[in-house]
């Protein structure tokens, strides 16, 4: 069936005094929630502190727009037909506008640990076969380990799943692998991609890591055609063509609570905006501690915030090379570990130290999306090299009060640490691309302080609250709260973190606001967006320009920059 809600008429500055809903934060979760609300006739205002929407899915350009880099869109699971991504986008009529490119079905991610190169395939059976081929002397242990993880994550043996979950699911993944007698090398291969959630293996429940593997093994990995910015651009278009509004450079400093109910927000500068509903897609800890305030918290929530741990923050290096890596067969996605001691690296970082040898995730947008219009000129490649590093401001020689401004970026001590970690990341990347330094024509690094400044996340964390047992399943924060009118969205909610999960969760939050099961409705075929109202997408469509609300969604076609320009 097709349902098309009648959207509210476009708003003007004069009637902005009261909204049906205000959404704080324009990451994928907040934007998806707002899009579903707008498509169902609610007058929605989205407020984003940054100048570009998209959160960690946004991009940035450098060298006179010659090169474009993704901040956090590297690879996404469950994007094929029937997957959660396609389902969530279908209710907004966006499945044709946001297209997903399957990445190397024969092996979407190349894992390199000392002495072993492994291609992560699609399918648990093939995954097990490749592990056994890599470590034939450990076949019995590998079969047991994979069988348990698969039972917990995929539920293909429903009668065995509860027993496996109780016996192994809540215990650390390292405990399971040790019980299976796996070598350090085999463990390193199984754990190599855990940089996608940056948490120590000895503190990661087996259910968490098994679920992470299943996310990609069930149907492979994908990348959005045109880069991560297309997500924010098209979600924003849905909102604004269906009666809503998105404002950037609008930092919320307080969620207004009166008589125990959320009634709106106050922006930095004092502007107050009233609404019947407030959805915070901002950082979970900052939502409660900074925006709502201690006086409105329950005793239980105060205790939780005091003990709350966040996933470790990322350190990223963005590189452009004067060579097309596709001609060399370089994989578009890889995780490179210079040692096989995955847990040991985390222990060092958690203690506030950064080891000399850093693991690195390597993402190559120009290989993932050969037809991408903004990544790089012909004959060039872009790379996003990601690792993780200590969160403490003292490690970066930055005072807490300095994070809100740009002054710390000129501090010599901060720059020295940044330069040293950049060197270490490039050293690891050389294990896969030996001449990376010789071919490098651009290099820029981003620290946890950068992430904290631009996304306003606690400790610069990309993935929200830590995936401990006390933060998973029934213990994870719900999208509804104890304050009437206040809802949550984003990576720290019951729907989990990651691009797919936060978009799916945004639909779930919208359903909670509306008091409806939107997931069921969309799965039954409901489409709430009037596609005829969406802005036509032409050949000169620029997702980045369209993600700065107030700008036109397209611009005059530009010539590709000349090499060396």
Image: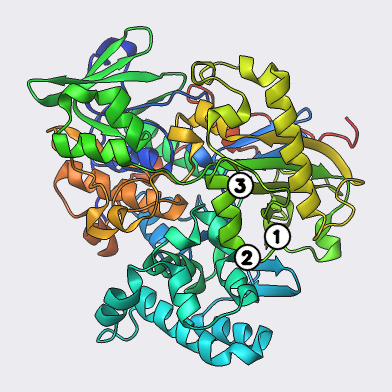
Whether 479 is drawn above or below 549: the answer is: below
Q: Which residue is mark 2?
A: 103
- Residue at the left extreme of this rendering: 259
Report if the CB atoms under discs 2 and 1 are less than 8 Å apart. Answer: yes
Relative to 156, is 195 on the left or the right?
A: right
Name the mark nearer the viewer: 2 or 1: 1
Residue 374 showing in the rendered view: no
Q: Earlier in the sequence, mark 1 or mark 3?
A: 3
Categorize mark 2 by other alpha carbons within 10 Å: few (<14), some (14-19), many (20+).
many
Q: How many marks?
A: 3
Mark before the other along the chain sequence, 2 or 1: 2
> Going 83% across and 57% down the picture, which residue do you hit?
433
Q: Which residue is mark 3?
A: 227
At numbered mark 1, what does the secondary structure look like: helix, strand or loop? loop
> What residue did someone put label 1 on?
332
Q: CA distance from mark 2 to mark 3?
A: 14 Å
């Amino acid at each position: 069936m097709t349902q098309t809600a009648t959207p509210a008429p476009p708003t003007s500055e004069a009637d902005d005094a009261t909204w049906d809903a205000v959404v704080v934060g324009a990451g994928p979760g907040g934007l998806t929630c707002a899009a579903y609300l707008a498509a169902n006739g609610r007058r929605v205002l989205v407020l984003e502190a940054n100048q570009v929407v998209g959160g960690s899915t946004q991009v940035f350009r450098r060298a006179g727009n010659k090169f474009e880099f993704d901040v956090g869109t590297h690879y996404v699971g469950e994007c094929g037909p029937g997957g959660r991504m396609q389902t969530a986008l279908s209710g907004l009529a966006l499945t044709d506008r946001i297209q997903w490119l399957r990445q190397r079905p024969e092996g979407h991610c190349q894992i390199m640990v000392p002495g072993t190169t492994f291609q992560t395939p699609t399918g648990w059976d093939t995954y097990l076969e490749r592990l056994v081929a890599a470590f034939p002397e450990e076949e019995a242990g590998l079969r047991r380990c994979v069988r348990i993880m698969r039972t917990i994550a995929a539920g293909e043996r429903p009668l065995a799943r509860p027993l496996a979950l109780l016996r192994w699911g809540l215990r650390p993944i390292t405990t399971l692998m040790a019980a299976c007698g796996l070598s350090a090398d085999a463990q390193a291969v199984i754990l190599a991609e855990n940089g996608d959630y940056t948490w120590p293996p000895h503190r990661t429940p087996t259910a968490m890591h098994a679920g992470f593997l299943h996310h990609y093994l069930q149907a492979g990995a994908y990348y959005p055609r045109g880069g991560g910015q297309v997500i924010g651009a098209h979600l924003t278009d849905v909102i604004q063509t269906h009666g809503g509004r998105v404002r950037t450079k609008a930092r919320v400093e307080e969620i207004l609570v009166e008589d125990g109910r959320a009634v709106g927000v106050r922006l930095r500068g004092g502007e107050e905006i009233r609404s019947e509903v407030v959805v915070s897609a901002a950082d979970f800890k900052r939502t409660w501690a900074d925006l709502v305030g201690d006086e409105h918290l329950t005793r239980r929530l105060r205790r939780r915030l005091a003990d709350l741990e966040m996933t470790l923050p990322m350190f990223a290096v963005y590189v452009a090379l004067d060579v097309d890596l596709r001609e060399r067969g370089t994989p578009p996605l890889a995780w490179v570990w210079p040692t096989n001691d995955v847990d040991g690296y985390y222990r060092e970082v958690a203690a506030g130290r950064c080891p000399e040898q850093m693991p690195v995730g390597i993402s190559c947008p120009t290989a993932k999306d050969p037809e991408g219009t903004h990544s790089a000129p012909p004959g060039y490649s872009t790379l996003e090299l990601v690792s993780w590093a200590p969160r403490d401001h003292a490690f970066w020689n930055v005072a807490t009060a300095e994070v809100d401004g740009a002054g710390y970026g000129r501090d010599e001590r901060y720059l020295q640490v940044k330069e040293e970690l950049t060197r270490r990341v490039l050293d690891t990347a050389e294990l896969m691309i030996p001449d990376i330094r010789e071919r490098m024509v651009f290099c820029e690094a981003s620290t946890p302080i950068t992430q904290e400044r631009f996304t306003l996340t606690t400790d610069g964390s990309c993935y929200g609250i830590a995936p401990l047992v006390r933060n998973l399943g029934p213990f994870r924060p719900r999208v509804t709260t104890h304050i009437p009118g206040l809802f949550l969205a984003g990576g720290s909610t019951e729907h989990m973190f990651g691009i797919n999960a936060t978009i799916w969760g945004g639909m779930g939050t919208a359903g909670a606001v509306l008091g409806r099961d939107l997931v069921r409705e969309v799965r039954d075929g409901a489409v709430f967006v009037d596609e005829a109202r969406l802005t036509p997408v032409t050949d000169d469509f620029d997702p980045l320009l369209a993600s700065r609300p107030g700008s036109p969604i397209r611009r005059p076609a530009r010539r590709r920059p000349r090499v060396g320009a």
